[in-house]
Image (tube, rainbow, N blue to C red):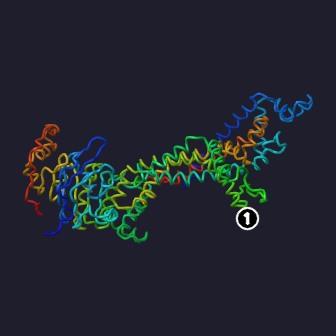
Amino acid sequence: MNTPTLAIDNLNLSFKGLLSRTQVLHSVSLNVEKGERVALVGESGSGKSVLARLVLGLLQDQRGVEVSGRIGFAGTELDQLSRAARRALRGRDMSMIFQDPTSSLNPMFTIGNQFHEVLQRRTPDLGTGQAQDTARSWLDRVSIPDTDRVLASYPFQLSGGMNQRVMIAMALANNPTLLLADEPGTALDVTVQAQTLELMRALAEDVGTAVLFISHNLGVVREFADRVYVIHRGRIVESGSTTAVFDNPGHPYTQALLAAIPRITGDGIPDLPEQIDLSHPAVHHNTGPAGHD
Amino acid sequence: MIALTRLIAKRLATASLVLIGVSMLIFAIARVIPGDPARIALGPNATDEQLAKLRAELRLDDSLPAQYAHFVSELLQGDLGISLYTNRPVTTDIAQFLPATLELVLVAGTMMVLIGLPLGMLSARYEGKWVDNLIRIVSLLGVSAPSFVWAVILMLLFAFYLPFFPIAGRISEQYAIDPVTGFLLIDTLLAGKPWAWLDAAWHIALPAFALALSGIGQAARLTRANMVETYNTPYIEMARSYGFSESRIARRYAFKPSLIPSLTIIGLDFAAMLGNAFLVEAVFAWPGLSRYGVAVILRKDLNAILGTVLVISATFLIINIIVDLLIAWLNPRIRHAEQKP
């Protein structure tokens, strides 16, 4: 069996306050195989975004953060790497797409400038002319018209959808092995969001990038992912292939989540029940393509 | 480019309005404060005829608006009148004394920017670490005392007890430098005398640092606060997620957006140094505009007071305009305001 692109095993995370300690992730285990698209679904505050930042190594240096468990990336144990080696992975072998495209791009630099610097992560001595060419071809791939104008623009001169595409192009431009997408496009309107997600899916497939897609939007997840992990209060409560989880939800939380999708039936928006049986054991469907233990 | 030209025109228009206002105000105040300028100038033994003659010369018997109108018409011809204190044209006096003050302020301003900004940057980058704590204590100390207090303290410590620096003056007597620009740091170079330049730099170091200290503290604190805020923005997180080094993030991605809000205040501080320079000059016997300014105020030398205040206000406004332009140039949102789709 191939080594998975991302193998998270028994990961615990807690934040230490002045007096108390808050545990955010409880022995989370999760796999993403090579080229696979995996979704991590959960409500706000379930710990899904924090997980992505742990994979990137952005949280570990912060004060009061305690991490245990292992994160394996394409065969390397991330916690055994030096800080510099971890940093070297970011922007080259793993990259991330953020929620709000317009505020995630630096307001002081042009798109062309930012693209150039991102490309230099892979090719340090890349000249401006070459960088412009590469950036232009990438913007073409995310269906951005008038690429020269966009490259000369600042993020505030472009629409949110446009910036989102730019971000997707930047994230994939260095052919990363793993793409972390943290609720991409939540700040955009629904049609634009759907378009950009479709783009991201097609490109990830082209490049052969594995995607860990973090979302609270079940509809989007169903369209996008091969496999799904459901996270609730820092615990994985259900996992399996998308069809298995959606057609045959085993955990009461997943059932509640699925029931909470608003339908146009005139019943109004259903609520998530306050009381969910947390003692219910996690459900793992073994029907997934890559198999989960 | 059009936006920039329009900005300059707008700022110049407001600046001239401010100057007119200041001139009227000072004109009125200088004449309302008690004391007869003619009597002070001529001394207690002057006869009534002499007094009347001088009063007529100075047009002190005209109405206030008439006096002001006369002043403006003279000013438009580049004439600020004769100083009763030096008996020379006020313009000549100012041309002699202003460069020393400007040199002091410019050196202090440069120190503020070159020391204050990096300190703030360092402090923000190592937020919560000992470097940050040290810089915060030092910068708080800097803003806690006015510059003349620092001038006295620094002079005692580094010129008196530990004689590293000279106590007074702009340059040692053995150097004779022909004034070209009036800025000794430039004139010595023009004269091709590097030793004299070093000597002038050695003389200006302590007073300029005393003048700069509170500005350094202010600049460091502001830059730190703005940068700490910038560090929490999504675009810094994105820069980190792309694996850019922390020092690159500090220098490039976090510093530039943080600089703009700091710059406004730094500009104001810079301009405020003109006022503070008066007191620092007094401490270090710096032959600038301050001694002249104080002397003419005490003598109620109307023309000289007005001239001094106008020149200082104009310098203040010019510094502010330069800072505004700098901000416009740095901030793409303003620079591209008219190209927005």
In percent of width and height, residue B339 lies at 47, 54
In percent of width and height, residue B200 lies at 70, 57
Whether residue A199 sits left or right of residue A260 in the image: it is right
Looking at this rendering, what residue extends furthest in the front direction? B161
Mark 1 Cα within 10 Å, few/some/many (few <14, many 20+)? Answer: few
- Tell me which corner region of the image, top left, top right, bottom left or bottom right, holds residue A81: bottom left
> Going 76% across and 58% down the picture, which residue do you hit?
B180
In percent of width and height, residue A44 lies at 23, 45
> Going 80% across and 42% down the picture, which residue do you hit?
B81
| On-image quarter of the N terminus of chain A | bottom left
Whether residue B299 sits left or right of residue A32 in the image: it is right
Above or below, B85 relative to B106: above
> Disc 1: which chain?
B
In percent of width and height, residue A189 lies at 28, 48
Instruction: From the image, tell me which residue sits under label 1.
Output: B193
> Going 60% across and 46% down the picture, which residue do you hit?
B11
